[in-house]
Amino acid sequence: MPIRVGILGATGAVGQTFVALLDGHPLFEITALAASERSVLKIYREAANWIGGNEMPDRVAEMVVQRCTTALDCDFVFSGLDANCAGEIEADFARAGYPVISNARNFRMQPDVPLLIPEVNPDHTVLIDRQDWGGSGGFIVTNPNCSTVGLVMALKPLHDAFGVDAAHVVTMQALSGAGYPGVSSLDIMGNVMPHIGGEEAKMATETGKLLGTLTEAGVDPADVTISAQCNRVPVLDGHMECVSVRLKAPASAEEAAHVMASFESPPAVRGLPTAPEFPIRVFEDERFPQPRRHAMAGGGMQVSVGKVRECPVLGVKFVVLSHNTIRGAAGGAILNAELLNAQGRLARRTEAVAAE
Amino acid sequence: MPIRVGILGATGAVGQTFVALLDGHPLFEITALAASERSVLKIYREAANWIGGNEMPDRVAEMVVQRCTTALDCDFVFSGLDANCAGEIEADFARAGYPVISNARNFRMQPDVPLLIPEVNPDHTVLIDRQDWGGSGGFIVTNPNCSTVGLVMALKPLHDAFGVDAAHVVTMQALSGAGYPGVSSLDIMGNVMPHIGGEEAKMATETGKLLGTLTEAGVDPADVTISAQCNRVPVLDGHMECVSVRLKAPASAEEAAHVMASFESPPAVRGLPTAPEFPIRVFEDERFPQPRRHAMAGGGMQVSVGKVRECPVLGVKFVVLSHNTIRGAAGGAILNAELLNAQGRLARRTEAVAAE
Amino acid sequence: MPIRVGILGATGAVGQTFVALLDGHPLFEITALAASERSVLKIYREAANWIGGNEMPDRVAEMVVQRCTTALDCDFVFSGLDANCAGEIEADFARAGYPVISNARNFRMQPDVPLLIPEVNPDHTVLIDRQDWGGSGGFIVTNPNCSTVGLVMALKPLHDAFGVDAAHVVTMQALSGAGYPGVSSLDIMGNVMPHIGGEEAKMATETGKLLGTLTEAGVDPADVTISAQCNRVPVLDGHMECVSVRLKAPASAEEAAHVMASFESPPAVRGLPTAPEFPIRVFEDERFPQPRRHAMAGGGMQVSVGKVRECPVLGVKFVVLSHNTIRGAAGGAILNAELLNAQGRLARRTEAVAAE
Amino acid sequence: MPIRVGILGATGAVGQTFVALLDGHPLFEITALAASERSVLKIYREAANWIGGNEMPDRVAEMVVQRCTTALDCDFVFSGLDANCAGEIEADFARAGYPVISNARNFRMQPDVPLLIPEVNPDHTVLIDRQDWGGSGGFIVTNPNCSTVGLVMALKPLHDAFGVDAAHVVTMQALSGAGYPGVSSLDIMGNVMPHIGGEEAKMATETGKLLGTLTEAGVDPADVTISAQCNRVPVLDGHMECVSVRLKAPASAEEAAHVMASFESPPAVRGLPTAPEFPIRVFEDERFPQPRRHAMAGGGMQVSVGKVRECPVLGVKFVVLSHNTIRGAAGGAILNAELLNAQGRLARRTEAVAAE
């Protein structure tokens, strides 16, 4: 019996990626699509301006889009809503007893909401137990911003092995990170845009929480200083990031490369359907990784690292690449749901809903 | 009476930029074009696969391309030669009494050869007097690598005002920096390439020499630690660089922006035909600079800075943009020649040639 | 005394091109900028998201944007308005006595409104005398769609010499033709879009009127069958068109190339400030024209033709390139105004306005 | 028992596509890789600059590259050789008894060599019986040029139903069609190149042979006049073609769309591993097909047609898209081999080789 899934914001760019990635999923089945007023009561084929390379799955194409109200027939929801409406709607669903696995930024930094990368901080899901939605059984779990996830997955093994004191990161981010229609072709063709609103602050605060430790009060952020410079480049998918780190314990570039290449998923994550066999691939070929060639590694869930070498200013430097709409958005959220399901948190909550 | 100029490597990408920029120059007139065997005895129109947006200047188009031998009828030469042949040929010309204003990397780090940015280290031209080419009167002057020049022009006022202890730079470099045919479209369309051979080392050593001080032995490099990460992006012209600096004396982002915006050319440089009125423009609009919109500022000779702000890791960070084939190659070399001419160094040497 | 110009829709993509091209114009001076409610009472620098490569002209940057009402202090107006509001506003201005030189499509096919390319049908300006705006002295003149102008300028000399029976045209159109923000980068990066709404019909009807003959009733369209297939390609500026023509009198490719290369502006047009010295350039090099290299020929006003050769199906084929926002929009409208001014039609009308 | 395959020109762009597409093929197994002197005796991983998005298959990566001599241990060869050496080498292999399934152009127009698209002219394989390679049992079969195949697959059902009298085609061709490194990024970024050497002639002659009828003397070309205009556009994969046809029997656009959409593979082709379920997909959505979204339809083997409508000049017009390196090169050749295998022509010949 598959678990029944609803998608909030189903017609948007993130929502479409949820639909594409859940096609044929072994555990989850889409049973409800919800979007804004403009799309309500249309069939999905008509409502969504499908922008992906693959075809819209036939079964979903004929489903009727509903309002984002808490009458959706499903066991939990993925939220691909825009931040300007996600706060209220996601809270409504949690209050109504739905688990909400959200890609929106609204609840990420709330003390009792897990900001979750399964390979990095799977234990943070216990925060769920501290959430209070009126005893509904609902809860909210979030995944980080698309530019944060690649950085943090590369930092995690370094932090475990040597302690990361500071990281300097310059991003070269793909267009799909801005949604659709997103960036005007007249702005980005043959160009670089050195500004992405709010992105640099998010990378700093989210990294602290993701690498932080659980306390009574929530998550004590890791004591890692982050400085980010974020740029948009004319690439379709895949955020490239040039990272330099200052480590607390001395480490050579070889040692740094080794701990990243040796990084393994925690036992709770291994074998989940969307989990890549190796979370990080470290390239020895100095020409790699490249977004167009490697963003889709591991079905878009593997993070690629390359050019690990000494940094005369901070210690060690490297590049990291991650797929921004899969690992950095819908795919990351799906992996979050798979972990929660393995922890029994989806089944329990959905039973609660069913009992109402 | 214009000074007569020869161009070595006239058919290549840099050579073509020399030809385009010298069209209508008030001081210099092209009287000789030289290139490799393949082009010799052809007229320039046939020999050069003209890749620029403007038309090839008519007068030059009909000139016959000669061998790169020291029989060229001119007072000095610009060299746009490839590094694999520039060493020998440029030395031959210097030995034969020609001033050689070179864009090649071969002699840049030689102790008695000026590595010159007129706004930064015009006094380094006295190194010429230490060169020994058998009393020929010839000499060699070089300009830095295209990725170095924007960085150093931004660092110069900071170094003068506060002292630069270290700089971390991530480049996003344009395609024209790789020459023609250069980068395959299959490699770079919708992609980022995180490796440019030799570039990161050049940025470190050249910056030290450019900001260094004259000594008996040559140039004592500035004690500035540089860490560079170099990337190729799908942009035609204009290298973008994300820079973070650690200053010796504390300075706020506002103070850093102020000294960069206030930077003036030395008196010897002001008013030279190719010198921009303001060497550095500091944007307040956080969306700028962008390569496609601002690379051509000041005829491609002005450096654009933007997003000056605090860096929690190193102190101050910003982006800097410079036109890689103008300021970073042919235009920079022409400005070098204009400075040398103003210092009387071209006239004297060319008289020596004439006297032979 | 320059003639005083107002620009309707001054903040949009076409309006910005008017502003850029009129900077330093010898006859016309911008004295009024008007735009939609969102921009009213802002200075132009704040109101317009300037997308061009050059800097916004300083004088205009400080002007205050006004409403599109007929109180503008100017002798005539250029209209860069969107079609959804151009009809009403342009009629208002004509009724109020202003000459309206419009780039919008609304009045193009109206019998008494000239659809004008000065080099092609300068005599069509007499239609102005048939316009009835309540005796105000105002009138409307239009220029064709950006994809029509290159085609018609190439067809004109062929039609005069041999008679064009039919033309088949496939366009590859630049992004700037869709305005700003226009085409999403996610749609067009590394892609071709085979549909541009309404474009194919416009190319057929407008060509007929432009090559048509004046009659009592208006313009009798030329008996030329046009079939157009319109595509969007990832090019910034410059529409490329592959044209095949069936001529009424037999002609070789050489003869066709010759009449196009020999095409001269009518005497009334020669010497106008914006008129290119040669309206059409015919390339012999089969690699040319190319949009990025040749769109700006003649300041963006020259049309480039290449690859003239036999077509086994229709007779003769070739490619034609024209700059879509200059020759195909704002520049074409400015040339229209220059012709009207030379014909005394701007002065007369503006005096009428002044007399009110 | 899989049939053992050798690949000539294995390190080039076409050769790499053969390797990628044959990974996991149910009938064919790569047992030999051959390339030019530069690669000989290297393992494939080192010899090939792998440009595809997917990983190089592990098994093949460790194979040693051999010379293109007739000592290869395989039952037949695919040839991805360049035309400048394909003629001699392919003839050598045929003479030595190998079936040669070639993508090169050298033998395409030879009277006794099939130019083959299985869905279009599967009966042409009988030409093999007329080839004389000294009784070796070897033979040569070719597939058409990458720009021809989409055109001909769209024309085939129209020709069968109504007779095609003439077709006018304008291509917008992808970069991968020019091989690697192929087109310089400086030439094609934000540009269109209106010339591809030899392409227009190939489209005419090859179409005639593909739609032609078998005679005693070879293939009597179809009496279809073709006029092609070929352009390169900044697209990675997928040739778009705007086609207008003049039919012998009158047909509406709806009828034309219907026969294309109803086109079925001949029985001999249905069910072959590489054959798409539907050879042609006809889109009703006027925005489609688009190369980036639909080139990979049917694993890159399905041809996409859209915008079927009346053409006032020739009768009916439409766009057709096909993947140039799969359907138009390596994938087409593999389908050819599958057809030959089903016809018993691979088995018989390979036994002959084994018997020597």
Image (cartoon, coloured by chain):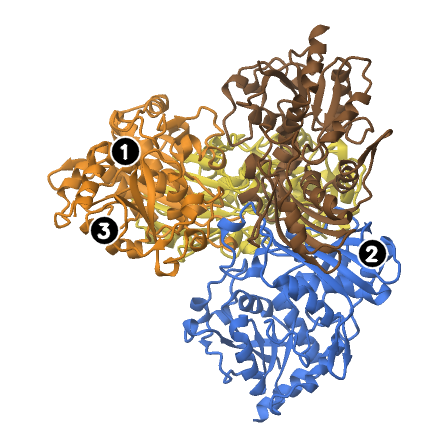
Chain colours: A blue, B brown, C orange, D yellow
Circle 2 chain:
A
* Label 3 secondary element: helix
Residue position for label 3: C93
Name the residue type under label 3. Phe
* Residue C264 position within the rendered picture, expressed as x and y whole percent measured from the top left: 31, 24
Assign the N terminus of chain C to one quadrant of the image: top left
Q: Residue A257 carries which label?
A: 2
Q: In this view, does A200 lie above or below B77?
A: below
Q: Nearer the viewer, mark 3 or mark 1?
A: 3
Q: In which quarter of the image is residue A200?
A: bottom right
Verify CB contact (< 8 Å) between mark 2 and mark 1.
no
From this viewpoint, which residue is outermost toward the front?
Answer: B267
Name the residue type under label 1. Pro
From this viewpoint, which residue is outermost toward the top?
Answer: B356
* Label 1 secondary element: loop
Residue position for label 1: C118
Q: In this view, does B139 lie above or below D316?
A: above
